[in-house]
Image (tube, helix red, strand yellow):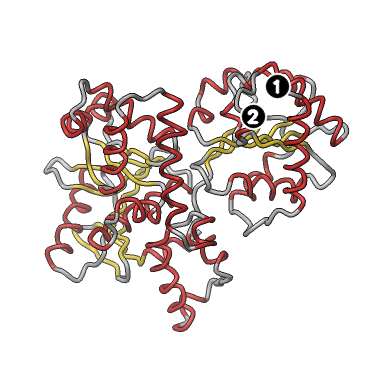
Amino acid sequence: MNKNLIKEVILEQKSARENFDLGIKRALLGLIGQYVPLPHTLVISGIRRVGKSTLLAQIMDSFYKQGSYYFNFEDERLIGFKLSDFNLLYETLLEVYGERKVFFFDEIQNVPKWEIFVRRMQDKGHKFFITGSNASLLSKELSTKLTGRVLSLELYPFSFREFLAFKGFFPDKQALYNTTERGKIKRYFNQYLIKGGMPEYLKYNDTSLLKHVYEDILYRDIVARYEIKQIKALRELGLYFLSNTAGLFSYNGLKRFLQLGSVNTAKSYAGYLENSFLISTLNRFSYSLKQQFIANKKVYCIDSGLAAAVAFAFSKNRGKFLENLVFLELKRRFQEVYYYKTAANLEVDFLIRDKGQKKSLIQVTQSLADEKTRDREIKALISALKELNGKSAVILSEDDEERIKIAGKTITVVPIYKWLLSQ
């Protein structure tokens, strides 16, 4: 790698950072503040264009005004950057910035074996903040390579509260009890459900931006990286998942649908899509790990706006998009999430297990106005509560709110927009 080229990139990036729009303050910033005093490397992963670079800028602005190094590897001029080039990069950073102790590296997964340089510099007392668009950065293998001195976080698209902040609306605790304020919240909720939380798309309101994210994931993050030959099958799988968000699937079913030669290929392709953060898969809860492994899984998309832009299926899937939205919020809250099937094959959308093994049940529905829907959702929860020896559960809907008591069990019905603002 040529030093003059590296210096040119550093100076261009330095100039860009000086005029960088910090955007709205991300909720994750508060948690990151707890990690700043620690010597550990902090790895922030997430889908492309989710705002990782902006979050790095917010970290620099909040905690490192005295100075740090910044370098973004997502630059076509850096194709071919190797482990051996890190010394040249460090030398050039010293030349441009002077001596500093903290590194911010953006999209570092593009460089093979980058963790060797980070570990060496860690041993010399340097701290690193790193972003990437591949779930391998969250792996236990990475922790081993950095001798355990690594902390990992995933950045999601805007939460509903962040979406409101983006719109310049900051409701207080009393807003839900004020008719005018509640009306604003519900109007914004409808926008959020349809548009999702990808920052750049919300800023420019151009669906082509979301389609480009999807194409970049398929071709740059998956086809190029894993040398995929069956590109048509991969595209069909991505479209299938985004068109069937909150739906069940099996790997055998995917194999037949895509006409693939083996189940392992179907598993691999689904794994690539999940590693790129486009989708998440959800296991069925069972005390048996074997049963969890062989049971059908559910799939969710990282962002409803992205799914709507690519799959063109929002209007008939509003209920599924509501469920997708709840799933993402549960993941933001660091919950251990499953779905549940009763002995009578009744489905509960979410089972959440905390560290004390306590289980909570959540059902998501668009409305309880239809008696058949109401009976189905309540029956599934009551049956699950009996099987799991639980006492209470929650139904999240668009606008219903009540408390239901049946057979010594309590079901609390809460509007989703209210639940989203509860933490």
Secondary structure state at the residue bearing disc 1: loop
Question: Where residue 78 is drawn, which disc sits there?
Answer: 2
Using residue 206 as the reference point, say whether residue 362 is left or right of it.
left
Crowd band around label 2 with a 10 angstrom C-alpha radius: few (<14), some (14–19), many (20+): some
Alpha carbon distance from label 2 to label 1: 8 Å
Indicate whether 283 appears above or below 400.
above
Closer to the camera, 19 or 148? 19
Residue matched to label 1: 1
Crowd band around label 1 with a 10 angstrom C-alpha radius: few (<14), some (14–19), many (20+): some
Closer to the camera, 116 or 418? 116
Closer to the camera, 302 or 144? 302
What's under tag 1, amino acid-wise? Met
Quarter where residue 345 is shown: top left
Indicate whether 391 appears above or below 128.
below
> Is the N terminus in the top left, top right, bottom left or bottom right quadrant?
top right
Name the residue at 13% across, 68% down.
Answer: 371
What's under tag 2, amino acid-wise? Leu
What is the x, y in percent for residue 190?
38, 68
Quarter where residue 271 is shown: top left
Secondary structure state at the residue bearing disc 2: helix
Indicate whether 283 appears above or below 204.
above
Name the residue at 19% across, 71% down.
Answer: 369
Name the residue at 63% across, 37% down.
Answer: 106
Using residue 378 as the reference point, say whether residue 125 is left or right of it.
right
What is the x, y in percent for residue 115?
63, 21
What is the x, y in percent for residue 102?
77, 34
User: CB under 8 Å between callouts 2 and 1?
Assistant: yes
Q: Which comes before the other along the chain, label 2 or label 1?
A: 1
